[in-house]
Amino acid sequence: MTEISTRIKALAFDVFGTVVDWRSSIIMECEALGRRKGVTRDWARFADEWRGGYAPAMDLVRKGRLPWTNIDSLHRMVLDRLLSEFEIDGLTEEEKDHFNRAWHRLSPWPDSIRGIERLRTRYVVATLSNGNVSLLVDMAKNAGLVWDCVLSSELAGHYKPDREVYLTAASLLGLEPGEVMMAAAHRDDLEAARSFGLGTAFISRPLEFGPQGKPDTASGGDFDIAAEDIIDLAEKLGA
């Protein structure tokens, strides 16, 4: 066993993009809406812009320009703007709410369920996502993901990459930051976690942004572990 695998007691997973394939899932939800409503649009661009509005909306909260607002509400703010920009009319409030909750229904990457199951045989395995708790619980049930604990930025009243998110997660697990490993497909998340004392595992997701996208990459020395997927991470941690 490696030094890192014996020191770490819990893994905290980023979810959007790392554990679930948000882009393909949202495109499918958009296409289903289009069929119901007889609307044809560039749904891949719609999905990308919906996701693209996520970080700027969070920054409004992080910088104090909005009071604490959960991800469901931020997604809805972006959705309302996109429905107008893409000239999609005639949705009832109930239909808009259901569409907004597409983020609760994202599908996992093929390796996610088995990889998490393996890791749970040896470690406490939790989410650590900017998604709100109810979103993460719904997603887990829908996708068949089994977590030991659902942790969210919502519990800290901050969004990643704020310090409070990572340290609150460690505290709630009853662990020191160095006993928790952040697992993510995004360098900024891992770099922040590392700066606050957490271990780091990069998980490659080359198709997160589609075949023409530009996902983050990492080499072996960039973080404590660089894995091809979650099953590979389990292998590298001896689970």
Image: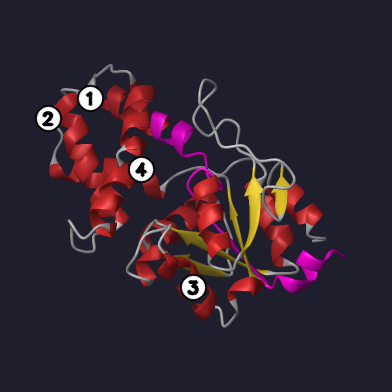
Q: Residue tagged by mark 2?
A: 90
The image's colour scheme reads secondary structure
Q: Residues in magenta?
A: 1-27
In the rendered structure, the answer to whether residue 212 lies left or right of residue 64 reads right
Dot placed on the residue nearer the N-terminal end, 1 or 2: 1
Residue type, numbered disc 2? Gly
Q: Nearer the viewer, residue 191 or 71?
A: 191
Dot placed on the residue nearer the N-terminal end, 2 or 3: 2
Q: Residue furthest right?
A: 1
The residue carrying pointer 4 sits among few (fewer than 14), some (14 to 19) or many (20 or more) residues within 10 Å by Cα, namely some
Mark 4 element type:
helix
Whether tag 1 and tag 2 are in contact, CB under 8 A, the answer is yes
In the rendered structure, the answer to whether residue 200 lies left or right of residue 30 reads right
Residue at mark 1 to residue at mark 3: CA–CA distance: 45 Å
Q: Tag on residue 167?
A: 3
Q: Position of residue 162 (x, y in %)?
A: 40, 62
The residue carrying pointer 2 sits among few (fewer than 14), some (14 to 19) or many (20 or more) residues within 10 Å by Cα, namely few
Q: Tag on residue 102?
A: 4
Q: Residue tagged by mark 1?
A: 37
Residue at mark 2 to residue at mark 3: CA–CA distance: 44 Å
Residue at mark 1 to residue at mark 4: CA–CA distance: 16 Å
